[in-house]
Amino acid sequence: MVRAVVGANWGDEGKGKITDMLGETSDIIVRFQGGANAGHTIVNNYGKFALHTLPSGVFYSHTTSIIGNGVALNIPVLFKEINSIVEKGVPMPKILVSDRAQMVMPYHILFDEYEEERLAGKSFGSTKSGIAPFYSDKYAKIGFQVSELFDEDALKEKIQRVIATKNVLLEHLYHKPLLKAEEVFDTLMEYRKMIAPYVCDVSAYLYQAIKDGKNILLEGQLGSLKDPDHGIYPMVTSSSTLAAYGAIGAGIPPYEIKQIITVCKAYSSAVGAGEFVSEIFGEEADELRRRGGDGGEYGATTGRPRRMGWFDCVASKYGCRIQGTTDVAFTVLDVLGYLDEIPVCVGYEIDGTVTKDFPTTSLLKKAKPVYEVLPGWKSDIRGIRNYEELPENCRNYIEFVEKEIGFPITMISNGPGRQDIIYRNC
Ligand code: GDP
């Protein structure tokens, strides 16, 4: 069976923890999109890890971890990550990398930096991991697939052709040093050495795995609102964050995805610029940021403080719908235990009219949050394993959100650890 774990919001919903938890009953875990620009934080018996490229399943000895064709593969980052986990005593994970995955080139990272510099204050808040230049090149058909590393003559010829256009931009737009074909080639030969043992025809491998009845978990990065088509364009990421894309980015039939677990955080946070209707500021935001997640809401990749907000039912309902959610995993609920009252955004007021439907970006800019305030539960809910044992106001909060978003909350996460989960039959 194939399951997907994806985000309903702006990312950082706690997908890493849910994937890590579901990894226990998975044979194969696949990353299908994105790159080293976002990260998961995972806490387990080996310690605390920030993963950017490796699937969260690397901590289990029974799982195979796959980098699918949809990923922006940064080979040195992948290797650094493998080494960092092995150093901390995690057994060498079984990793396969799609021969159709494309590689983040060193110049993609440079172009990302140069473009942010050029845009100055009007930047998109890129993490400067080269992701936008990477996907631009992929769709402009001047990207490099892993498979191309193994045909040196064709590779040399293509590098010449591609960097000719890059150098025009470097010289005339960015006024930066030019690329040299030989240096790019040598770097790619280094990459080949690193990646060769792992290269695999992933879609064929997964086809067989599905036939053999294996449990496959697709692991999404970021969330619905960062999807280039359905998110808050242009403040989005460059690859689709939706479960549907899991089929493409892994190379499996769409109808094989039987369960879509959409992770939704019990309050909101976002990194980078972009519309965020239920955002809060000042001391109220600082306190939630300090108490949030596991040790505060700061980016796993960048360390940037995250923007904070109350739970947004409008955005989350949309985020769950666009994912094709079968189950909602409601996370980080324990963090809200300090509040006397908890505002929840239940509508957007746009030009005097209240809507519960998430609009396009131009309307979103005008939206003001409509709040309903629920009573807090004023206690620590960590350690609770049965739904009925949660305080009444906490259950009311969950059930209120569930009704507003219209998708069943079947898992409630009340702590960062694998065991901090409450299953609920809906
Ligand atoms: P992801 O990118 O969606 O995986 O999100 P992050 O890696 O940013 O995860 C959010 C943070 O919340 C991480 O530090 C997790 O360890 C932590 N976390 C996940 N679930 C819970 C939870 O239920 N309670 C608490 N307190 N922290 C959690």
Image: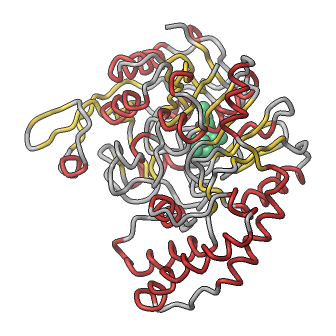
**Quadrant where the N terminus lies?**
top right
Q: Quick one: 362 or 195, which is closer to the camera?
A: 195
Q: Quick one: 142 or 377, which is closer to the camera?
A: 142
Measured along the vertical axis of the image, is residue 387 above or below residue 286?
A: above
Q: Is residue 373 left or right of residue 236?
A: left
Identity of the residue drawn at 86% across and 33% down? 61
Measured along the vertical axis of the image, is residue 152 above or below residue 304?
A: below
Identity of the residue drawn at 42% across and 47% down? 226
Residue 213, position as x, y percentages in the image: 72, 17
Q: What count of labels does the image hold?
A: 0
Q: Is residue 165 visible?
A: yes
Find the residue positioned furthest to the front: 153
Q: Is residue 206 left or right of residue 258?
A: right
Q: Quadrant of ligand 1?
A: top right
Residue 140, position as x, y percentages in the image: 45, 63
Q: Is residue 45 left or right of residue 188?
A: right
Identity of the residue drawn at 73% across and 70% down? 188
Residue 186, position as x, y percentages in the image: 76, 78
Q: Is residue 293 visible?
A: no
Quarter of the figure with residue 156: bottom right
Quarter of the figure with residue 267: top left
Quarter of the figure with residue 375: top left
Measured along the vertical axis of the image, is residue 405 above or below residue 305?
A: above
Residue 425, position as x, y percentages in the image: 54, 7
